[in-house]
Amino acid sequence: MKLRAKWRSLRLNAKFTLVIVLLVWVPVIAFALMFFHNTQESLMKEAASAMELELQDTNTQIAAYVDSVNMSTQLFLSDTALTEYLEQISVDEKMTTQEIRSFYNVTVASLERLIYNNPYLYQIRVYADSDTMQEMMPVLYRMSRMEKLAWAKEDESEWEGWHFDYEDVLFGTGTGENSGKIASYVTKMESYGYGEIGVLEVAISMETLFPDLYGQSEDQWHCFVDGEGTVYFGEEDGTHTEQAGNIFPELELNDTGEAALTTIRMERDSLLVGSFYSKGLTGTWISVYDLSAVMEELNVTRNLVFVLIGALLLLLTWMINRIVNGLLKGFYNVLGTVREVQKGDLDARVPVEGCGQESGVDEPGELALQVNRMLDHINELMEDNIHREVLAKNAEIRSLQNQINAHFIYNVLESIKMMAEIEEKYEISDAVTRLGQLLRYNMYWKSGTVTVREEIEYIRNYIALMNLRFDYEIYLSENLPELVLEQKIPKMTLQPIVENSIIHGIEQMAEDTNIYVKGFIQDGDCIIELTDAGNGMSEERLAWLQKKIAGKLKSVKPNSEESDMENPKSITSDSGIGLKNVQDRIRLTFGSSYGIQVASKEGCYTKVRIRIPVESA
């Protein structure tokens, strides 16, 4: 409302200027916003596409390393000679020097070649549970030496499986360099009848398994999350660690093995995060692209463009306002004259020369000429109107002199009533009273609608007067709840229906009968039913009457050939006119979905149903 009031208070030149500016610059600004939005989306899509390809390559590479480790594990576990040797050691079975030498030269040498021929592997070691066994490097070691490794310090139940990012301190304290960190797949070696005979460690360098961990930059970094939620970085950076802490709560890690891309916008960073689950490693690889710098550069360009657009907008607004003021100068001259006339100066005229209208081709000048002619014509009409008002007043006085005062009729009826009561003719007195009420109801039309209660009271008076004419009695039975009695209906809606019931249904019977009025609420509408126990009508006559009420029959002259064709036998040409009028008045008042319906059975009854909307109290 405030915006509408401000708009109305603006001068016309300001409105024109504002509309023109909006028509020009709204599309320009919308196009600029759409352009930068599409550019941003395009950058995100390109980054997402590149990350998806990178994730696929990384997944393939890791899967190849895992397959190599698994294959080497199976080769060691399936080596019969190695298994038999470990079984003998586990029970302290004495072996000859020749047997030991043969095992070393054949089995150990073969396993050593397997290790050296696989460029991916860091080392494969078998740890036997024996303190007296002769170690055969680089394959066979005593279990006491294994206890130096980080994963062996954990609970024995957690030995098996993958272990990441630990130093090889089997023969010392380790180098402490990230490049020396290794990952390994540990398997317990068991034999039927001997139980656990050793532990197999197949190790691969962390840098070999996860090369991208060690090639990170400011805008791109990676990490690996194992099954227990431990996060591994190649070269830990405080910034990356902080970002990772904010990313992981937002990231939904999955175990489908498919790459999943997520865009995460933080307070200062715009990050594209990609991940995939490695079934072989039972962990999730995460790659992060930091697009903040690219987006910031795009935002700077966008802001500069909008500053230029704003400057051009101000310049264009000033120029358009000057042009519009010049074009509307003639209009404001006309408006000034109209305001003078509004104040009462009917002699004011628009200066045509001020509109630049000497040639008579400019629209404001033409408007000024027409306004001047209109003012001249108004002056002439006012003089004529004064003359006509004088004549009308004189005619009204003469008309009032010829009118019969309605109160005269009521006073006369009241005098007759009093005379009847004095003579103790109470039936005549009641009849005169009811007649007076009928006349008053008919003659006073303060409004086109009345309450159902008022209409029913009128019906009571009407039936009472009709009973004076007949030797039989017509009874009015009512079943109308309070809500129905308070509803509004067009005046004289029920009376034509009751009159039809008496004339066409009851009068021919000439015996005591009943008219039943029922009201109720149905589907949010008010229903009033008037049922008479009269002659009813045939199906043919009922169908004709329904068409008449619906307006599907055209009006014809009585007794014409066309009337005989349209009207069934025993139906006069004026039948249904009253009901048709009631239908039309209800629909004019409430709408086409409301009106009346007629149902009848010959020799039994006729029922008229009225549907009107419910009006809340």
Image (cartoon, rainbow, N blue to C red):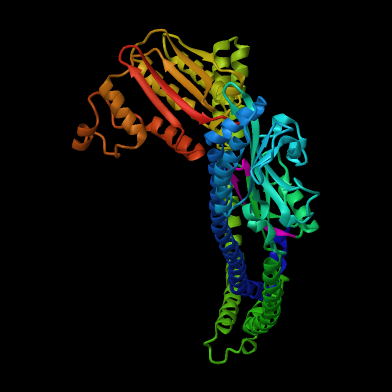
Q: In this view of the protein, which residue sits in the foreground, 249 or 604?
A: 249
Tell how many labels. 0
Q: Is residue 558 above or below residue 391?
A: above
Residue, far bottom: 358
Note whether residue 539 is visible.
yes
Query: What is the magenta segment's predominant secondary structure?
Result: strand
x and y percentages locating residue 596 in the rendered image: 43, 29
At a point 23% along the width and 27% down the height, the residue shown is: 568
Residue 421 left/right relative to 304: left
At a point 74% along the width and 37% down the height, the residue shown is: 152
Q: In this view of the protein, which residue sits in the foreground, 36 or 59?
A: 59
Residue 174 left/right relative to 298: right
Determine the image quadrant of residue 289: bottom right
| Magenta segment includes 471 | no
Q: In this view of the protein, which residue sits in the foreground, 315 or 505?
A: 315
Q: In this view of the protein, which residue sits in the foreground, 519 or 5?
A: 5
Q: Give the residues drawn in magenta, as a range.
A: 269-283
x and y percentages locating residue 325 in the rendered image: 67, 82
Quarter of the image for the N terminus: give it: bottom right
| Magenta segment includes 270 | yes
Residue 244 left/right relative to 263: right
At a point 44% along the width and 27% down the height, the residue shown is: 496
Note whether residue 255 is visible.
no
x and y percentages locating residue 327 in the rendered image: 62, 83
Determine the image quadrant of residue 343: bottom right
Q: Is residue 301 above or below residue 250?
A: below
Residue 444 left/right relative to 574: right
Q: Is residue 284 above or below residue 507?
A: below
x and y percentages locating residue 266 in the rendered image: 73, 55
Quarter of the image for the C terminus: give it: top right
